[in-house]
Amino acid sequence: MGSGLNANFLPHEEDVDFINEYVNLHNDIRGSVFPAGSNLRFMTWDVALSRTARAWGKKCLYQRNTHLDKAYESHPVFNGIGENMWVGPENEFTARIAIRSWHEEKKSYNFQNDTCLEYENCSHYIQLVWDNSYKVGCAVTPCRRIGNIHFAALFICNYAPGGTLTRRPYQAGAVCSQCDNADRCTDFLCNYQFWYPPWEVPRPLVCDPLCLFAIFLRGACFMLCVIVVFVIQSRFPDVLAEKQMLSDSRRFSTEEEMRSKEEEEGETEGASEEGEEEEDEG
């Protein structure tokens, strides 16, 4: 079970600094692979993946999450979630130490042959640099004991889409040379910065090229209207004056008509009253 006693010494998965540090560490490693990768995707944070990491971490078990391969049990959209785990003394935990330990497995991995040294584990490194993984969510949990480690920290990162051991983790070649046409090369990684899953909360405020064009067009139309009005006023200064005079004339005409109508109604009422008086006298 999670201890909770020393939880304040470990970062929370909703902390902005925590998120930025872990995502940046992943992208730094992915962007500096050797041989260089032509199709690795830029990673961004995923709240659902971090919640799954937190939920499994509370069990304080240094073993694979048994729910990752079950449909929609670890994420509302993705299936086949990837996972990396690290465990160590709580007072020794840092993001860099944990993630770099996965990266160290590269020494046992042969990219050309797609093989790992016998009796060695390369799965953490392969997931770390898996080309198609572009979402990551991590959490670190304090545990009273895991194995022989007392007051341990269990660090878990989940990835979507998850990697496999069926091929090389990425395609070697000039960086970003196999990105999609709409992608931008960011830190040597393929990044489509204007797309976000519709279920991501909070949703980032972004404006794609079409959005930027619409904003520019609206601004240009507004400025054009201002210029047209200015030119008309400069060349035809009497136009507005004539419109004002016409408006005043119509207003005066309307007032006179209303006054005449009131006078006529008054005269009619007076004549009616006189007729009634004559009838009474008769």
Image (tube, grey):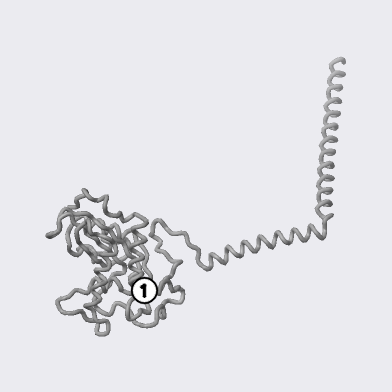
Q: Quadrant of residue 57?
A: bottom left
Between residues 215 and 117, which one lies in front from this camera angle? 117
Q: Residue furthest front?
A: 92
Q: Which residue is mark 1?
A: 31
Lateral position of residue 58 relative to residue 228, left or right: left
Which residue corresponds to the image point at 30% horizontal and 73% vertical from the top-left?
Answer: 129
Where residue 81 sits in the image (x, y, percent)?
Answer: 27, 66
Which residue corresponds to the image point at 35% horizontal and 75% vertical from the top-left?
Answer: 32
Q: Is residue 3 above or below residue 266?
A: below
Q: Residue furthest bottom?
A: 113
Between residues 117 and 262, which one lies in front from this camera angle? 117
Between residues 238 and 19, which one lies in front from this camera angle? 19
Crowding at dot 1, Cα within 10 Å, few <14 / some 14-19 / many 20+, comes out as: many
Where residue 135 sits in the image (x, y, percent)?
Answer: 34, 66
Lateral position of residue 281 relative to residue 34, left or right: right
Q: Amino acid at mark 1?
A: Gly
Q: Secondary structure at mark 1?
A: helix
Which residue corresponds to the image point at 48% horizontal and 62% vertical from the top-left?
Answer: 206
